Amino acid sequence: MISQTAVHARRFVAEGFAAAGARGYHYRVLAALEEFGPASQAELGRRCRMDRSDVVAAVTELEGEGFAERSADPADRRRNIVTITRAGTQQLRRLDRALDTVQDELLAPLSATERQTLVALLGKLIEHHGGVPTS
């Protein structure tokens, strides 16, 4: 049941992000930059649990859209530091709204109480398995 629900959730999220001109990796990177501040690409990979090549591709795409900036780290010129831009923060807000819509669509058959219970239980599972619940 979890696997079947995850398939629907991934599809809804992909469609919601696509409508906003984004992908899941974009959201993960922008959210990490917003929450933790500027970071090296390697640090973004660790925070977002993304492969280094995926981080580079996502940052390149975000930079091309004006949502992130990459600059040389003054402490180590071989390393890039990525920063979210004002436009990136606005895009993150759009993606947050898209996720809210997706969550409402996915959880439509549940009452408010059932939604709260499900979110609490999922958070408990995520925390148990080494993740950090986001809600």
Image: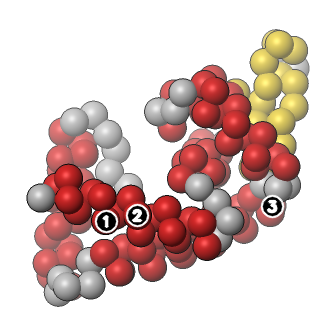
- Give the image location of residue 117, x and y in percent: 14, 70
Measured along the vertical axis of the image, is residue 84 above or below residue 105? above
Colour mapping used in the image: secondary structure
Between residues 117 and 108, which one lies in front from this camera angle? 108
The residue where tag 2 is placed is 11
Q: Earlier in the sequence, mark 3 or mark 1?
A: 1
Any mark on residue 32, and which? none
Amino acid carrying mark 1 in the image: His
Amino acid carrying mark 3 in the image: Arg
**Residue 76 figure quarter:** top right
The residue where tag 3 is placed is 86
Q: Which quadrant of the figure contains the N terminus?
A: bottom left
Is any atom of residue 83 visible in this view? no
**21 on left or right of 110:** right
Name the secondary structure under disc 2.
helix
The residue where tag 1 is placed is 8
**3 on left or right of 23:** left
- Alpha carbon of mark 2 to alpha carbon of mark 3: how far? 29 Å
Q: Residues within 10 Å of mark 3 (few under 14, many from 20)?
A: few
Q: Which quadrant of the figure contains the C terminus?
A: bottom left
- Alpha carbon of mark 3 to alpha carbon of mark 1: how far? 32 Å
Q: Residue at x 68, y 65 (%)?
A: 21
- Give the image location of residue 65, x and y in percent: 82, 56
**38 on left or right of 17:** right
- Alpha carbon of mark 1 to alpha carbon of mark 2: how far? 5 Å
Is any atom of residue 14 visible in this view? yes
Between residues 44 and 3, which one lies in front from this camera angle? 3
